[in-house]
Amino acid sequence: MHTSSSRGLAYASLAASMALVGSYVGLSKLLVAVFPIFLLAWLRFGLAALAMVRWVQRTPGEAPLSPADRRLLFLESFLGNFLFSICMLFGVAATSAVAAGVVMAGIPAAVALLSRLWLKEPLRPRVMAGVACAVAGIVLLALSRHGSSATTPAPWWGYALLLGAVFCEACYMVIGKKLTAQVSPRRISALINLWGLALVTPLGLWQALRFDFGAVHAAHWGLLGFYALAASVVTVWLWMKGLRHVPAQQAGVFSVMLPLSATAVGVLFLGESLALAQVLALGLALTGLLLATWPQRNATAASTPA
């Protein structure tokens, strides 16, 4: 029926969004080697703003933004775009990639917790079991990808920043659920991108004044265009579209697709090997998805908004 088909499309949108994020992580590393970080962010938001200029307008029948909607849009961009990047970059620099991977595995659990506290969504046992599988899968994946070499001592604030990044991303997902009840996914994507552009413009201009744009190759400009459209346009639109039909805590489980797709890109296109531990991690993560998303016979109509 319409309910099950729209829910299936929502699941596909959420999975595709996170898979696309994972796939361009490797490409963004290539861009960071060419552009300073704040300049890269500024160019990304600027290009995406040009691509989404028509999305800023209200769709027919959509209500004007209320003061509460405007505050949520600012928080969505400040936490999910700006503060998340700062916490993650400086947290990884102070600790290690292994620590970042393990701590970021807590995103589904953080989403479940925040959606319970803020959106009053019930913590269903099967969703919590799915979250546990997803977290276990990503932790195993992070550990297996980076080996078991001894870790160097890291300051406590590095781990605190990584944990802050987890809750910034979780807030992004939960706030997005709140916004999709009033604002169209396309308009949310355009408006939070504009806020991101405004927030990073002073730092972006500061780095642009000292940057040699003539030294950038055409291939890197093309890669920048793909990165801007994928990161600020396609992934955000897909995520917000999926959130309209799925509880936030259930949607948070789809964040497992990020490291899974990054691993798939490494194996299929970068020649990396797939160890047994990574296969087990894939199995755990997919089991988590099935547990959290398999339709319940009794609660179809009640749980899906019109």
Image (cartoon, rainbow, N blue to C red):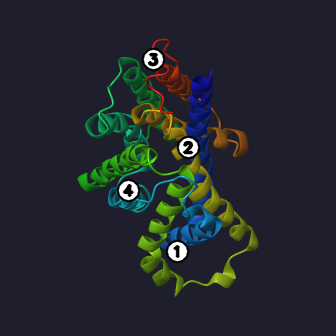
Residue highlighted by disc 1: 39
**Secondary structure under badge 2?**
helix
Mark 4 is surrounded, within 10 Å at the Cα level, by few (under 14), some (14 to 19) or many (20 or more) other residues, namely: some
N-terminal-most mark, 1 or 4: 1
Which residue: 57% across, 34% down? 10
Amino acid type assigned to the residue bearing label 2 in the image:
Lys
Place of residue 202 in the rendered image (x, y in percent of width and height, measured from the top left): 43, 80
Amino acid type assigned to the residue bearing label 3 in the image:
Ala
* Residue 236 appears in the picture as rendered: no
Q: Does 266 appear above or below 232?
A: above
Residue highlighted by disc 3: 299
Marks 2 and 4, Cα distance to the nearest angstrom?
17 Å
**Secondary structure under badge 1?**
helix
**Secondary structure under badge 4?**
helix
**Secondary structure under badge 3?**
loop
User: Residue 241: which numbered mark, if any?
Assistant: 2
* Quarter that holds the N terminus: top right
Residue highlighted by disc 4: 69
Label 1 with label 4: CB-CB less than 8 Å: no
Which residue: 40% across, 33% down? 249
